Image (spheres, rainbow, N blue to C red):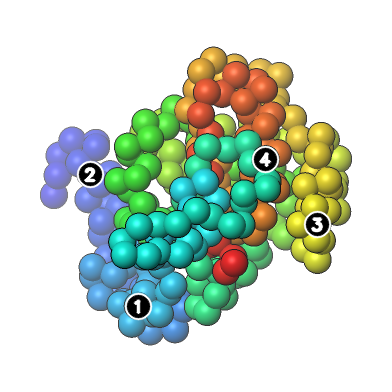
Amino acid sequence: MPTSPTQRTRWWRHAVSAGLDLLFPAKCIACHGDLSEVQRESSICRECEERLEFIDWPVCPRCAAPVPSTNGVDLACNHCRGDKLRFQRAIALGSYEGLLRQLVMRTKADRQGVVTHALAELAWQRLRDQLLELQIDVVTAVPMHRWRRWQRGANAPQLIARSLAEKLNVPCAGEMLRLVRNVPPQVGLSRPARFRNLSGEMAVGASYHLAAARVLIVDDILTTGATCSEAARVLRRAGAADVTVLVLARTPA
């Protein structure tokens, strides 16, 4: 048995983890089947992972919407051309459909964070290189009003922000952004109404200083980009030099 306190702590953690695995084998978050050793970190089996609509097609670098490609040349995006999006770029793990849509919906009430952690791990595995290239200084999440947080019992964007910040080895300021009031949900609103609904409704906490910082905003779904655009607007107003949006899923155009 290890002798130093640190070694003993690690040994006990490993022993407890191994014992729990024997009593309660790790299960896939999607199909609940048993996981192999290599699949346990992402908590999803190979078969279910292959069903996820990960983005592997040309997308607009600004809003992550699919763009047409002809003879290897990506054409201009028609989806955000008329929008004044305040963030510089958007990165999406996959398309908001099929199994990925089901899992993202589950994160909204994922009180234990099991599904959220799994999707955060998948996002890191697949988007790691893109994120590292951006040299992010701080990670935050779109704000959720405290009453909605209480109703759901979960805040997936904030959990994902913490996970990615730890992997990027940068600070996480998950509560840097706040809502001025409990604004109505965006669901069901038209594109222009989504932008109007959030205009002027966000603020950056007074204790945060963003002198030329490169900020990563985390959200679960990107549709019009209205929520993240308002968040980026107040961040840049507070001094951020560059704002990137990362979402689990981009709604099909």
* Dot placed on the residue nearer the N-terminal end, 4 or 2: 2
**3D distance between C-alphas at marks 4 and 1:** 35 Å
Residue sitting nearer the eye, 41 or 64? 64
**3D distance between C-alphas at marks 4 and 3:** 21 Å
Residue that label 2 marks: 8
**x and y percentages locating residue 43 in the rendered image:** 38, 68
Of helix, strand and loop, which one carries label 3? loop
Q: Nearer the viewer, mark 4 or mark 1?
A: 4
**x and y percentages locating residue 130 in the rendered image:** 34, 45
* Dot placed on the residue nearer the N-terminal end, 4 or 1: 1
In the depicted structure, whether residue 175 falls above or below residue 28 = above
Which residue shows up at 63% across the image and 36% down it? 86
Q: Is residue 250 left or right of residue 20?
A: right
**3D distance between C-alphas at marks 4 and 2:** 56 Å
Q: How would you rate the neighbour count of disc 1 (Cα within 10 Å): few for under 14, some for 14-19, many for 20 or more? A: few
Badge 4 vs badge 1, beta-carbon distance below 8 Å: no
Q: Nearer the viewer, mark 3 or mark 2?
A: 3
Badge 3 vs badge 2, beta-carbon distance below 8 Å: no
Of helix, strand and loop, which one carries label 1? loop
Q: Amino acid at mark 2?
A: Arg
**3D distance between C-alphas at marks 3 and 2:** 49 Å
* Dot placed on the residue nearer the N-terminal end, 1 or 3: 1
